[in-house]
Amino acid sequence: MIQLQQIGRFYRQKQTCIQALQEVDLQVEAGEYVALTGPSGSGKSTLLHLLGCLDRPDQGRYFLNGQDVRELTVPELAKLRNRRFGFIFQGFHLLPRLTAMENVIMPMRFAGIGGRPAEDRAQALLQRMKLQDRLHHRPHELSGGQQQRVAIARALANRPEILFADEPTGNLDSAHGHEILLLLDEIHRQGTTIFLVSHDPNLAARARRQVRLLDGRVESDEKGPVADPHESLRPDHGTGIQDVAGES
Amino acid sequence: MKATGRLFLQHLAGELWKDRFRVLLVALGVAWGTLSLAVLIGFGTEVVRRMHQVARNSGPAWLRFQAGATSKAFQGFPAGRLMWLELRDGPAMQASVAEIDRVCMEFSSGSGNPIRYRDRELLIPLSGVEPEFHQVRNFPVVPGGRRLHALDFRERRRVIFLGDRLRQRLFGSEAAVGKWVDLWGFPFLVIGVLQPRATINNYNGEDRDKALIPATTFQDLRGWRYPNFCLVQPLPGMESQQVVQEVYRWLGKKRGFDPNDRLAYSLYNHVETIQQVDSMVATSQRLNMVIGLFALLVALAGVANCLGLIMEEGRRESAVLLALGAPPGWLVALRIGQSLTMTWAGGALGLVAAQFVLALAARLPLEGDAREYLGTPRLDLLTAALLWVVLGATAVAFSWKPARRAAAVPPMTWIGKEE
């Protein structure tokens, strides 16, 4: 599904050239749950942004389902992000003037889905995020956990094939953070490929595959069992959410 | 399409509302610029139109020659010889100088001529003129009266044509045509009254205070032989300087002086005066336009500055929108939409204010002939529409590049800066 070949990304700051990523090779199949880990400044967020086509590499090639994304134009990249990717940011990045419903509807509108179908789907997604009583609240009227759940609903709005989550629990307390991770587990179980960036090894351990970066290079790429594969199914920790990314 | 359109409007309204204070200030700036320009255009256009008319009110094109004294010795004649004009010079000159359309002699006896109607007696400027005077000096007649014509001249009739203000002073609210007045103690029949009109060129008193009688009658009553002025109207399209040269040549030959001796007959060239007035008014109009355009440019620079700030502050949000899949064109349109809304809202406000100011100016009571010169300034629909288009085009021009630049940056450039 995804193939990175010798990917490099540099930032120039005055006279110095910072190598954020160097010679990164990576192959990811559909349905994988990949955690990108590493210390701060190791390049994991940069890699996630490149994978999500939020940024362009300076070196190497990125194939998505066999298509070299370098060949895509800016509008094509926007369409790709809209139809096939979902993003969850550490800072939520909800649009402050829009309500929870409107925030979720937004990507659907860009995909040409409007009116009743968009509203119904947004409502269903928010309901599944247990936000049915917060549909018409604006971001500043929601808690951090609620905002992140709105952001997840928004990321799932167009039924993405790949979900990119950049430190999704970074701005949340442990209870809310845990809730979000359970949601991601649910989404993954329903077949969505997930890339999770975290510098916390315990969070990363939830993913079956862990790619560790150090100084912009892939230090290790390990596949193993999740820390507690049944945790998300336990009633006391479960989200109660079913078919999170599926049809409403 | 409908969905993204609604989203666009929703977002545009949100963006404008978020920066409402700044948007208001910018719109007020544009309104001020538009108001300045629109009022200057409104006033300027009308003043140009009126001055163009006023300059031609005292005749579309004429030259006035007045007898003087030679300043150069010529063919044995010494310098300092007094020159003169005669009534017969007119037909002779017209027959000889092809560039001339009309010639008319004028006796002018200053402003001390006593005229009386019943118990009202005034001292007025008086001219004895030939019938062509009405055309050359553009003396239109109030309906119900008539101008002096050839028969009055030939039969040396005691008929009089009154300036409009003279009629008012002499007759008050009474009709003047058909009444008899005493001029120098002789009865004269009033045959017509001058239609009120503002002029920039008057000599020996203002036209509206003047009375005209046939030149022949003037000669009979005053015993004058030599007219004071010779008025020459060039043929349409003829260069006035060429006509002047030909007239001097003709007079020089007839009276025996050097045609280059311009003191033998002094000249007033009304054609040049009109050209000077036109040029002065056009220059002032251009200056007004430049001032107005500067005011508008300052306002539009405010729009550009404000838009720059909005883009700067909203770049993370723009990046989020791009990350969510907003087409870059949509974002460009959003920013241009913001710019256009601010500019057009300000423009509309400015145009409405300008219309109000111009309407107020049109109702302002002005003294004397000020209204004749200023006219009734107004902003026509075409000018307003043109201003509107120019405002829109400038707004797009100012916002196009920064909007494109903001939409072309990879979203991560700004999203990635949060951590």
Image: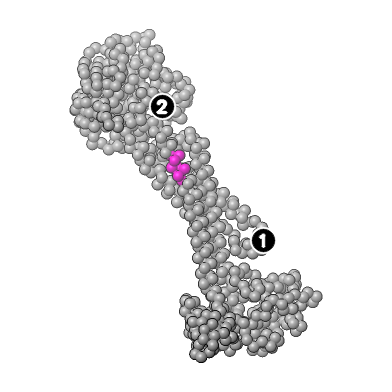
From this viewpoint, which residue is outermost toward the right?
Answer: B119
The amino acid type, in three-letter code, at marker 2 is Leu
Q: Nearer the viewer, mark 1 or mark 2?
A: 1
The amino acid type, in three-letter code, at marker 1 is Glu
Question: Which secondary structure class fits the magenta region best?
Answer: helix
Identify the residue at horizontal 69%, vertical 80% (top origin): B160
Boundaries of the magenta span = B300-307
Name the residue tied to disc 1. B367
Chain bearing tag 1 is B
Image quadrant in which you'd find residue B106 = bottom right
- Quarter of the image with the N terminus of chain A is top left
Residue B10: x %, y % from top left: 45, 35
Residue A246 higher or lower than B56, as above or below: above
- Quarter of the image with the C terminus of chain A is top left
Dot 1: few (<14), some (14–19), or many (≥20) neighbours within 10 Å?
few
Residue B142: x %, y % from top left: 66, 73
B65 or B363, which is in the foreground?
A: B65
A147 or A215, which is in the foreground?
A: A215
Q: Is residue B304 magenta?
A: yes
Relative horizontal placement of residue A207, taking residue A118 as reference (left or right): left
Q: Is residue B306 magenta?
A: yes
**Numbered label attached to residue A94:** 2
A163 or A25, which is in the foreground?
A: A25
Circles 1 and 2 in contact, beta carbons < 8 Å = no
Relative horizontal placement of residue B14, taking residue B50 as reference (left or right): left
